[in-house]
Amino acid sequence: MKIRIIVILLGLLIAMPSMNLSAQNKADDVLGVWLNQDKDAHVEMFKRDGKIYGKIVWIKEPIDPDTGKPKTDKHNPDDKLKSRPTLGLEILKGFTFDGKKEWSGGEIYDPKSGKTYSSYMVFESKDVLKIRGYVGISLLGRTTSWTRVK
């Protein structure tokens, strides 16, 4: 009986690091390139300092029809930031994985409105990511679905 308990305990000790690794791999499942719901931009999710960030890496219409120049962050409320290019713009910041299914504690910036929202992300399926942006509580917000770019 004692040997059986020892074998079970050893098995658990051996399995624990791999369980942690599995959670780590799941945390990285969000990494890669995603097509936004409007199908007019690709956002690359990457890890920095243990948190998830995302930047625009492709725009369907990269030229502003009003100026004939590359699109800029013209709706940003900070006048100093209005001239920065939309391409390469970091729009997702500071998400952490909860160890189960959700990335939270981050913010999403909408360059079409110049507004920043609290946000969280969950998978709807393997290649569809639901992102909810909200003000205050998550009931007051909007959800968008992004598709993984293959």
Image (spheres, rainbow, N blue to C red):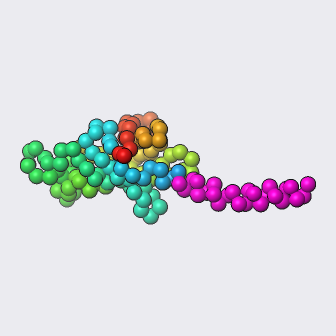
Q: Is residue 10 above or below residue 62?
A: below
Question: Which residue is found at the position 68% from the left and 58% from the top?
Answer: 16
Q: Nearer the viewer, residue 109 or 70?
A: 70
- Which picture quadrant has residue 53? bottom left
Percent of width and height locating residue 150: 36, 46
Magenta range is: 1-25
Percent of width and height locating residue 22: 58, 54
Q: Nearer the viewer, residue 135 or 41?
A: 41
Q: Is residue 94 among what the camera can see?
A: no
In this picture, residue 144 sits left or right of residue 61: right
Question: Which residue is found at the position 69% from the left and 57% from the top?
Answer: 15
In this picture, residue 116 sits left or right of residue 97: left
Percent of width and height locating residue 1: 91, 54
Question: Which residue is found at the position 28% from the left and 37% from the top?
Answer: 38
Q: Is residue 71 among what the camera can see?
A: yes
In this picture, residue 59 sits left or right of residue 45: left
Q: Nearer the viewer, residue 69 or 115?
A: 69
Q: Is residue 76 above or below residue 144?
A: below
- Which picture quadrant has residue 78? bottom left
Residue 44 sits inside the magenta stretch: no
Residue 11 sits inside the magenta stretch: yes
